[in-house]
Amino acid sequence: MFNLLGKSNSPAEVSPSGSVHTSGWDALMENALTKGDAYVWTAQDANIVAADTMLSVRNDSHTQKLVIVRVEVTNGDVATRYEIHKITATYTPTGTVADEINLGGTGKAAPVSAIHDETGQATQGTVFAEIGAGVPVETYKRDTCLVLNQGEAVAVDQVAESTAGACSIYGFFIDRK
């Protein structure tokens, strides 16, 4: 016999049939929506050159982690490939401030640096996914679960030049424990 303890060192709740109930990312996202801590950052009609960063989002919070749950890109006038990567070098974001939407409707601003048409990020970082190609004006989605600590960032680079692509990055904040 053993005791199953939760994060707070309290005994886990077990149903009469012996099953343990847990919460996953969906419950965390729902909580973030309620608290006004869920966001989407976008770059629309982005006319950037090949190999540039279409959109980057850096967590600037001292008290919360940023969980990236989805990246969407739409090819512009060129069928191109996009590389999603975690930025591994310290950088100063320069470019145009990306649009930010609070998904909980609270209007609360996120503690991030979100930039599109990035010009100050010379080191790409670790590519963990590629999406795109296909045909012009097609949308591609990649669900992920990337947790960013303070100062860490995720970005989307386009491989071939397109004059009207779009990118959205969805995420929510959770308290550090």
Image (tube, grey):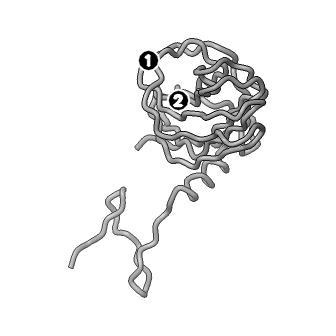
Query: Would you call the spot at circle 2 few (<14 residues within 10 Å), some (14-19), or many (20 or more)?
Result: many
Left or right of 108 on screen, residue 51 = left
- At x 49% / y 36%, what residue is drawn? 64
Residue 65 x %, y %: 48, 38
Left or right of 89 on screen, residue 93 = right
Q: Which residue, as the protein is rendered here, is positioned at the far left?
A: 1
Q: Quadrant of the N terminus?
A: bottom left
Are the residues tagged 2 and 1 within 8 Å (C-beta)? no
Q: Quadrant of the C terminus?
A: top left
- At x 60% / y 23%, what residue is drawn? 53
* Front residue (pair 136, 54): 136
**Mark 2, residue position:** 59
- At x 74% / y 42%, what residue is drawn? 138
Helix or strand or loop: what does disc 2 sit on?
strand
Mark pair 2, 1: CA separation: 12 Å
* Front residue (pair 66, 158): 158
Q: Amino acid at mark 2?
A: Asn
Residue 141 x %, y %: 64, 47
Residue 63 x %, y %: 48, 33
Residue 158 x %, y %: 61, 28
Marker disc for residue 37? none
Q: Amino acid at mark 1?
A: Thr
**Mark 1, residue position:** 90
- Tell me the quarter of the picture where residue 54 sits: top right
Helix or strand or loop: what does disc 1 sit on?
loop
